[in-house]
Amino acid sequence: MKYPQHLLKLFQILKKLPGVGTKSAERHAFQMLTWSPQQLNEFANLVSAIPHELPSCNECGCLTDRDANCFFCNNPARNQSVICILAHAKDVYSIEETREYTGVYHVLGGLLSPLEHKGPEHLKLPNLKERILSKKINEVIIALDSTLEGDATALFLKKELENDPVEVSRLAFGMPMGSSFDYVDGGTLARAMAGRRLF
């Protein structure tokens, strides 16, 4: 079937979204063709503004509003002596939904993955140790996906932190092996957070 080139490009872009295959990409693209020029412009402007309007906090890596202080780092109500290490900024919102955690965060920006040529240099690690010492962190919670990459990253972090004066724990009960935060409900995450153990 001969599709116009611009439509084919749109298919390819949409297929980069998680869970979107060829047929879904085609459905989404043809639905967008029914939008008004104003709706398409609004969508395009919103997407193009993401890097400017949704920056990451320089200290913890969480998403912030443009020209706003980080909600987590600058919140006096949060326990500044406990830091939770996560792979991605979206994982922060999964933990927050449990209402079990009141500390601060450190977002790595990914996981170790030799197959994808992602080593320690690809993770946001340089200021982690500095934060632990300067903020007098007592506990580090490693909250990574229970996958091969997540486990490898957790072991790497444990080794990196073994000489630091902190207690290192990892999420426990309720996180099935091979699971991703995307598919774990809030109740399961709450149990995992409450039942964390020394790592």
Image (cartoon, rainbow, N blue to C red):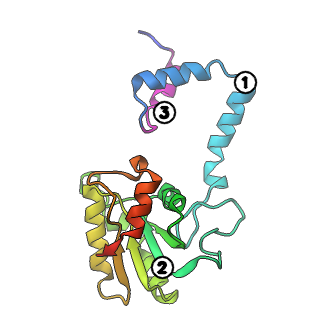
Pointer 2 local density, CA inside 10 Å: few below 14, some 14–19, many at least 20: many
- Three-letter amino acid code at disc 3? Ile
Q: Which-is-in-front pick, marks 2 and 1? A: 2
Q: Is residue 114 above or below residue 101?
A: above
On the image, the x and y values in percent for residue 144 come to 36, 62
- Three-letter amino acid code at disc 1? Pro
| Image marks 2 and 1: residues in contact by CB distance under 8 Å | no
Q: Is residue 136 visible?
A: yes
Q: Name the residue tied to disc 3.
A: 13
State the residue in front, 34 or 77. Answer: 77
Q: Name the residue tied to disc 1.
A: 37
Which quadrant of the figure has residue 69? Answer: bottom right
Q: In the current view of this chain or complex, which residue is farthest to the top? A: 1
Which residue corresponds to the image point at 62% horizontal and 49% vertical from the top-left? 50
Disc 2 or 1, which lies upstream in sequence?
A: 1
- Three-letter amino acid code at disc 2? Val
Which quadrant of the figure has residue 43? Answer: top right
Tell whether position 16 is magenta.
yes
State the residue in front, 18 or 38. Answer: 18
Which residue corresponds to the image point at 24% horizontal and 52% vertical from the top-left? 115
Residue 182 left/right relative to 58: left
Residue 46 left/right relative to 80: right
Disc 2 or 3, which lies upstream in sequence?
A: 3
SS majority, magenta: helix
Q: Name the residue tied to disc 2.
A: 82
Element at badge 2?
strand
Q: CA distance from mark 1 to mark 3?
A: 19 Å
> What stretch of residues is rendered in magenta?
4-18
